[in-house]
Image (tube, rainbow, N blue to C red):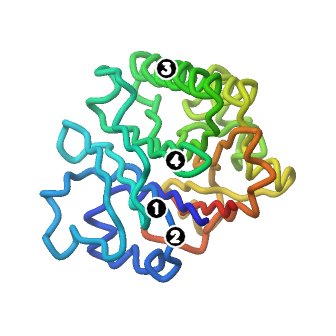
Amino acid sequence: MKIITWNVNGLRAVLGKQGLDWAWRERPDVLCLQEIKSRPDQLPESQRDFPGYEAVWNPAERAGYSGVATLLRTPALETRLGMDAPRFDTEGRVISTLHTGFRLFNIYFPNGQRGKDRLDYKLDFYAHLLEQCDTLHARGENLIITGDFNTAHRPIDLKNPKQNEKNSGFLPEEREWVQKFLDHGFVDIYRHLYPERIQYTWWTYIGNARQRNVGWRLDYFLVSEALIPRVKDVVIRDEIHGSDHCPVELVIE
């Protein structure tokens, strides 16, 4: 089974540039998109249909902002939008789908760069999600969390860690929340498979950062520990352009 995650930074723009054509050729079983910035009715009819896929949408209430979509080749056993928390759910950040053997969370985590209120919002989002995951783990479910975490966990996960210690995305309190997920039964499966590999998934548009590979690894697959033996590979598809993020691919039995 192949699951691909990608923060497209505007679905209409990506579709307008045929930016998903590579994905249709890859034919993933699940395609998780973040920061779609649109509702389905804002797409031309020709772009609203994804042949061979069922689309699950969770757009933000605010137009042109946030939002996630999950495209499924096989319908999910169960689908949930949001986290049963209006404070977070108005921003369209979470879709969970149940599959045989695991529950998949497609998530666009908040960005904390717009002041203390948004940083607190981001940390509270992490806390609420972890509480839900703890409950699901306690029930015996296996979980996969994927998407744009908006945090680089370790110094190896960004080009300039020292210069960014006081910037949101690499603040100690943000990194601690990623670690809490790992302390609660999750594994960063890319780093588990490739402990020393340096690859990034996001580059600012400023200063030719992508061409110089001055990036951050912000897009993850966290999997329940019990799923580790089923994972065959995780591939950062940094050859794919069309957004300031690149896709990440999980291959799992």
The percent coordinates of residue 100 (x first, y second) are: 56, 51
Q: Does the CB distance between marks 1 and 2 fall below 8 Å?
A: yes
Which circle's residue, 1 or 3, is located before the other in the chain?
Answer: 1
Q: Please report the residue visible at 48 percent of the width from the left and 61 percent of the height from the top.
A: 30
Which circle marks residue 128 in the picture?
3
Disc 2 is placed on an element classified as loop
- Mark 2 and mark 3: Cα distance apart in space: 29 Å
Question: How far separated are the C-alphas under marks 1 and 2?
Answer: 6 Å
* CA distance for labels 1 and 4: 11 Å
Residue contact at pointers 2 and 3, CB within 8 angstroms:
no
Q: Nearer the viewer, residue 128 or 35?
A: 128
Tell me the residue at 55%/40% (across/down). Answer: 149
SS at mark 3 in the image: helix
Would you say residue 147 is visible in this rendering? yes
Looking at the rendered structure, which numbered label has been put on residue 28?
2
Query: Cα distance, mark 4 to mark 3?
Result: 16 Å
Answer with the quarter of the image where residue 144 lies. Answer: top right
The disc, 4 or 3, on the residue closer to the chain's N-terminal end is: 3
Residue holding disc 1: 31
Q: Disc 4 on helix, strand or loop?
A: strand
Kind of residue at disc 1: Leu
Which dot, 2 or 4, sits closer to the camera?
2
Q: Residue at x 75, y 37 (%)?
A: 154
